Image: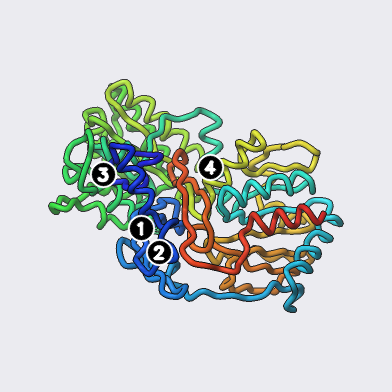
């Protein structure tokens, strides 16, 4: 279902002739027509739904089908155009680029953060960071770090959205309801109409572990409620450890662990053992407490244990704003994931030392280059550290940066590629309207040329 089949997603295309026909119907070939654009991929969260129907009326986009509230708000935002600014005054693009280049020439250690961009944008940032001895981190760097630490320490057995859609019969959401960050997750992946190998999707069993979660989307189309085990996510490691103990056949004297009755966890352990294809799903961004990477590691170990009984996988949901894309590109270009510095002339990875907050708090960098081409995320402000912002034009800044350049959004204003939240599938996103705004890749390449 991955790769070329993203064109249709629900129904795989069989023959080459049908593939050609489907490709000719893609937005790329129809974007300037008055017809609605079909099968449009959405770049506004890393679920990358690719079934939206969007109308372009003189540059104003309207989502006609399959848009969640987030997608509708972003796609239907009236196009905004503004000039680049230097210290708050309008400037030409050439002057803004030249000013950034002069700042970078004088800088000892620039920080490239935010990094909300597509594959081409990130590919342009890497050489610039290398040449200027810069440090790379993402706006969702904390979540990325938890994910990466667990992966590098013990590895994991993970699955994809497509596998879940086609095989899973038991889904356990750990510390996340998913729906907040990925609004159409249940519609697209859990309660989908067709499944190639698994049981009928409406028979899937849903379990939530955590507190204050929105469990309503976990109710099946036939009205079966999910099981919600209410617990403090800071005590997840104890709960998971107990389930692992029960799986090994050990008896437990305690009646409750982390406030949860042992009998409930024993029932859950049995259900896990008897699943045909179970999946543990977590979001590193939601596990926001000290040493949460250890919880992720314990979850990975639980998945390994369960494979002694049945087929079980984990799914660590990558974050939004191009964070999976930025991590993947950094890894394949430099050999290291994010939170890597080129300050010594070679890539040096350190997930603690090279965090944006830490570097700024210790004034260990002298320029911040902030990139945000999907959402209006503002950069952290630290006195005496000049900031360059390459971001969407509607960004409302608390403080005027040294230089601001408005940039285009991939999947709206220009074509691009993005990685999905499961980290393994890259999708092409399309230009939906004519826009005078430059891409991040173009601006960063121009800065590099001006150095
Ligand atoms: S769930 Fe995410 S990718 Fe899908 S339409 Fe909503 S914002 Fe876009």
| Residue 322 pos. (x, y %) | 53, 52
Disc 2 to disc 1: CB gap under 8 Å: yes
> What secondary structure is found at the residue carrying circle 2?
helix
| Residue 76 pos. (x, y %) | 42, 71
The residue at the point 41 percent across, 43 percent down is: 235
Residue holding disc 4: 146
- The residue sitting at the bottom extreme is 89
Residue holding disc 1: 183
Measure the alpha-carbon separation of dots 2 and 1. 9 Å
Disc 2 to disc 3: CB gap under 8 Å: no
Mark 1: give few (<14), some (14-19) or many (20+) Cα within 10 Å.
Answer: some
Q: Identify whether 87 is placed above or below 130.
A: below
Q: Is residue 44 left or right of residue 355?
A: left
| Of marks 4 and 3, the one in the foreground | 3
Residue holding disc 3: 11
Mark 3: give few (<14), some (14-19) or many (20+) Cα within 10 Å.
Answer: few
Measure the alpha-carbon separation of dots 2 and 3. 23 Å
Residue 212 is at least partly visible in this image: no
| Residue 362 pos. (x, y %) | 75, 54
For marks 3 and 1, the one nearer the N-term is 3
């Amino acid at each position: 279902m991955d790769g070329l089949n993203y064109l249709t997603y629900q129904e795989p295309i069989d023959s080459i002739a049908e593939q050609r026909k489907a490709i000719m119907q893609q937005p790329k070939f129809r974007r300037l027509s008055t017809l609605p654009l079909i099968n449009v991929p959405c770049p506004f969260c890393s679920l990358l739904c690719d079934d939206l129907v969007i109308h372009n009326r003189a540059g104003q986009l309207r989502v006609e089908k399959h848009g969640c509230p987030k997608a509708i708000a972003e796609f239907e935002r009236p196009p905004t155009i503004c000039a680049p600014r230097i210290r708050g005054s309008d400037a030409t693009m050439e002057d803004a680029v030249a000013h950034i280049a002069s700042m970078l020439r004088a800088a000892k250690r620039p920080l490239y953060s935010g990094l909300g961009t597509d594959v081409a944008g990130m590919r342009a940032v890497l050489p610039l960071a290398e040449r200027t001895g810069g440090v790379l981190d993402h706006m969702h760097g904390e979540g990325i770090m938890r994910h990466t630490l667990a992966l590098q320490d013990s590895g994991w057995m993970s699955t994809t959205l497509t596998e879940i859609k086609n095989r899973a019969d038991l889904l356990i959401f750990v510390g996340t309801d998913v729906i907040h960050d990925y609004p159409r997750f249940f519609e697209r992946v859990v309660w989908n109409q067709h499944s190639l190998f698994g049981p009928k999707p409406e028979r899937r069993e849903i379990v939530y572990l955590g507190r204050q979660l929105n469990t309503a989307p976990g109710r099946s189309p036939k009205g079966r409620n999910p099981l919600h085990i209410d617990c403090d996510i800071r005590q997840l490691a104890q709960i998971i450890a107990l389930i692992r103990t029960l799986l090994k056949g050990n008896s437990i004297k305690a009646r409750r662990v982390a406030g949860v009755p042992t009998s409930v966890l024993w029932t859950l352990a049995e259900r896990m053992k008897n699943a045909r294809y179970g999946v543990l799903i977590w979001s590193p961004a939601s596990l926001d407490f000290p040493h949460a990477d250890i919880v992720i590691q314990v979850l990975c170990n639980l998945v390994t244990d369960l494979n002694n009984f049945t087929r079980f996988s984990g799914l660590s949901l990558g974050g939004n704003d191009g964070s999976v894309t930025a991590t993947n590109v950094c890894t394949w270009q430099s050999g290291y994931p994010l939170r890597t510095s080129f300050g010594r002339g070679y890539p040096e990875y350190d997930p603690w030392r090279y965090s944006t907050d830490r570097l700024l708090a210790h004034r260990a960098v002298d320029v911040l280059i902030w990139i945000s081409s999907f959402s209006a995320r503002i950069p952290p402000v630290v006195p005496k550290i000049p900031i360059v912002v390459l971001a969407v034009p509607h960004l409302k800044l608390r403080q005027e940066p040294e230089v601001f350049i408005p940039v285009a959004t991939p999947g709206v204003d220009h074509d691009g590629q993005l990685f999905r939240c499961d980290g393994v599938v890259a999708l092409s996103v399309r230009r939906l309207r004519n826009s005078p705004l430059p891409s991040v890749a173009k601006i960063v390449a121009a800065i590099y040329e001006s150095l």
